[in-house]
């Protein structure tokens, strides 16, 4: 039986829902929309397909929006059977809505809606968009099929003249109360300190009554002030999209096991329809967070749809009116992320669909480059890179590293799509830019790339140097200098956000510094876990303690304690310690180069496209099995074919790395 889908103008489901997501922020009783340009779906759409019928047949067009159908220019109503004779039948479906996503479901034995239809916004015709979430005629793509799960408090205690309710870990949920003696005030908190601060907590609700359902919000703790003696019961309903996790990490190291679980929980809470930054504060779709989520997703849920939806929602329609999230580096990361998505998925159709939007974005970026090819921020642009101090006068080295990788991504994707001349154009831009980056930003005396040459300060930070390693801008000699003089140099200002820690640890692994990365994961992420974190924080500075550690952006509770860009241990362990990576798009071929001598016992599992890889360490042996062909295990310089369900056994010498804390 043929699979039938609800269909819409390509990208419009993600664009429409992305707009709604970026309207969802709430702070201290105020609604706070994203501060950048937001697009919505096209409001007036038609769907077209021509059939050559051998026999008479019938079909019906279902829609939740108004419109009509024409067959060979004869009009018919929606939601009513249409009978056709044999021969050529040109079908056009017209739907429109001032509020919702225009979409249709065509049901029939011979005529049905699938990816072969074309959608038009009356300017351009393109292959339709669709999702595996919406395959039944009773579905409505404007109503997301969220899962609801009830959860109950782990503890309710008297505190500060009221009731402090602890759900045991961070959740994103609605909540209601029963057995109330009178209407109550509810203060939410990711931490105890936030919940107890009835003035500064991000969320609170007054005059809450019996069985009143409060909005979906992020919290671990609830505080009910002025309620010392009364009884109450609370139930939270967690609301999310079901996603199956395929990543498993269970070792003889309890702390590392916790770090994996906390990272995985953080990632899932920030991943539903889209990758969002955090569940308490912004709840927006940010390009930098989404870029890293792609890698984390690849080693855990391997959910291609959420990746595609996020890419589409970030970008909007074809014309570019503003940098993604107003941030130049996020526009560049958006282009790079599409190449990363292709490596993971092998989805050439998506490349074909998204390419016009990639070209427009790259044109927009290159229009603000100088005669040397360096991209420069304009007054309305945000050159972010990271929260750490960076010399941002004139062209910034880190931005040029991102631009080089974006040009490389365009070159590769153009080749995949058979556009050789276009690929050569981007390659030439890449070659010129790389030469100038070396000439103007490399400082031989420092053995590093400087932030800015225009300022004359010759300031060295980690950021540009990390990216130079990651994106292979630095040659081998430069990489060694960067390692010694920057990455392993405590005099160079340390990073305090998990966001750039992701890039830093990635670069260190590429330079073979597995011991350093293993130790950092345990000490940096482990410190948050040891402080009781059930999700990874937006920022962590080991020098800050007490309630001050929850402050950010001048707000005592401005820091997000569940932030997507903090979940990178899942990627680092999967990519470098398990050692799994695709060597052809969509894991048509892949390799495993494990570094698992840190464990005496380990059970692990990682997803690949259409398959799973299993790892087991026990008694000095590593056993790897996979349920499909195409892989190679690299061990001690040997390449061993990995055949379906046939184990590869490798001897390993187990070892331990002592942490700086003496662990």
Image: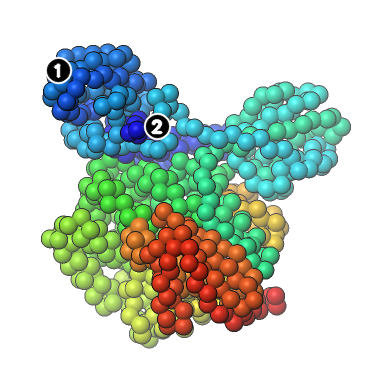
The quarter in which the N terminus is drawn is: top left
The residue located at (36%, 85%) in the rendering is 477
Q: Nearer the viewer, residue 514 or 376?
A: 514
Please tell me whether residue 61 is drawn above or below residue 638 in the rendered image: above
Q: Nearer the viewer, mark 1 or mark 2?
A: 2
211 lies above or below 239 = above
Colouring convention used in this rendered image of the protein: rainbow
The answer to whether residue 395 is visible is: no
Looking at the image, which residue is at 46% across and 83% down? Answer: 636
Image vertical order of residue 513 relative to residue 471, above or below: below
Q: CA distance from mark 1 to mark 2?
A: 28 Å
Count of marks, rendered view? 2
Is residue 494 rendered to the left or right of residue 641? right
Task: Determine which residue is flagged by label 1.
Answer: 73
Q: Which mark is residue 135?
A: 2
The percent position of residue 507, horizontal first and vertical second, equals 44, 72
Q: Secondary structure at mark 1?
A: loop
Residue 55 at what x, y percent from top left? 19, 22
Which image quadrant for residue 399?
bottom left
Q: Position of residue 405 (x, y in %)?
A: 31, 64
Q: Residue at x 20, y 60 (%)?
A: 415
Where 191 falls versus 249 (above or below)?
A: above
In this orientation, which residue lies closer to the viewer: 59 or 377? 59
């Amino acid at each position: 039986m043929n699979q039938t889908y609800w269909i819409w103008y390509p990208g419009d489901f993600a664009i429409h829902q992305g707009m709604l997501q970026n309207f969802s922020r709430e702070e201290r009783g105020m609604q706070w929309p994203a501060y950048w340009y937001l697009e919505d779906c096209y409001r007036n759409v038609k769907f077209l397909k021509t059939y050559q019928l051998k026999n008479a047949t019938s079909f019906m067009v279902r829609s939740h929006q108004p419109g009509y159908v024409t067959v060979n220019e004869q009009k018919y109503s929606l939601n009513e059977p249409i009978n056709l004779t044999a021969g050529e039948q040109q079908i056009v479906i017209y739907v429109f809505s001032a509020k919702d996503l225009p979409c249709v479901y065509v049901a029939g034995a011979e005529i049905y809606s699938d990816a072969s239809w074309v959608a038009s916004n009356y300017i351009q015709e393109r292959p339709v968009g669709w999702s595996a979430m919406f395959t039944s005629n009773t579905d409505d793509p404007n109503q997301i099929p969220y899962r609801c799960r009830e959860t109950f408090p782990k503890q309710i205690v008297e505190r500060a003249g009221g009731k402090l309710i602890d759900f045991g870990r961070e959740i994103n949920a609605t909540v209601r109360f029963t057995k109330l003696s009178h209407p109550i005030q509810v203060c939410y908190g990711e931490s105890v300190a936030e919940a107890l601060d009835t003035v500064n907590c991000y969320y609170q609700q007054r005059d809450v009554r019996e069985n009143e359902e409060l909005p979906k919000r992020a919290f671990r703790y609830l505080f009910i002030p002025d309620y010392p003696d009364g009884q109450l019961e609370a139930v939270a309903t967690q609301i999310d999209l079901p996603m199956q996790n395929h990543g498993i990490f269970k070792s003889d190291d309890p702390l590392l096991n916790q770090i994996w679980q906390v990272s995985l929980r953080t990632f899932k809470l920030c991943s539903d329809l889209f990758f969002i930054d955090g569940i308490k504060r912004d709840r927006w779709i940010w390009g930098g967070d989404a870029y890293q989520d792609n890698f984390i997703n690849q080693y855990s849920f391997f959910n291609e749809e959420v990746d595609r939806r996020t890419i589409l929602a970030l970008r909007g329609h074809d014309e570019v009116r503003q940098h993604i999230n107003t941030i130049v580096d996020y526009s560049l990361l958006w282009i790079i992320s599409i190449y990363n998505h292709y490596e993971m998925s092998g989805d050439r159709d998506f490349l074909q669909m998204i390419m016009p939007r990639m070209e427009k974005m790259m044109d927009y970026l290159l229009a603000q480059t100088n005669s040397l090819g360096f991209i420069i921020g304009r007054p309305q642009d945000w050159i972010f890179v990271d929260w750490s101090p960076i010399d941002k006068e004139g062209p910034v080295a880190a931005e040029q590293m991102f631009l080089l990788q974006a040009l490389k991504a365009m070159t590769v994707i153009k080749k995949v799509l058979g556009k050789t001349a276009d690929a050569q154009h981007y390659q030439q831009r890449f070659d010129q830019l790389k030469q100038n980056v070396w000439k103007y930003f490399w400082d031989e005396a420092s053995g590093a790339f400087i932030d800015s040459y225009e300022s004359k300060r010759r300031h060295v930070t980690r950021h540009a140097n990390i990216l130079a390693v990651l994106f292979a801008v630095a040659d081998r000699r430069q990489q060694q200098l960067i390692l010694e003089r920057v990455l392993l140099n405590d005099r160079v200002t340390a990073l305090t956000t998990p966001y750039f820690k992701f890039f830093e640890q990635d670069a260190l692994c590429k330079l073979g510094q597995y011991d350093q990365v293993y130790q950092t994961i345990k000490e940096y992420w482990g410190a948050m876990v040891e402080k009781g974190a059930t999700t990874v924080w937006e920022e962590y500075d080991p020098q800050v303690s007490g309630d001050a550690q929850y402050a950010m952006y001048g707000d005592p509770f401005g820091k997000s304690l569940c932030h997507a860009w903090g979940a990178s241990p899942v990627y680092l362990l999967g990519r470098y310690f398990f050692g799994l990576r695709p060597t052809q798009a969509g894991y048509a071929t892949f390799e495993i180069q494990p570094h698992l001598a840190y464990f005496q016992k380990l059970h692990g599992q990682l997803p690949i496209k259409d398959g799973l890889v299993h790892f087991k360490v026990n008694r000095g042996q590593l056993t790897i099995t996979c349920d499909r062909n195409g892989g190679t295990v690299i061990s001690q310089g040997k390449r061993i074919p990995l055949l379906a369900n046939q184990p590869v056994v490798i001897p390993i010498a187990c070892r331990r790395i002592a942490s700086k804390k003496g662990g």
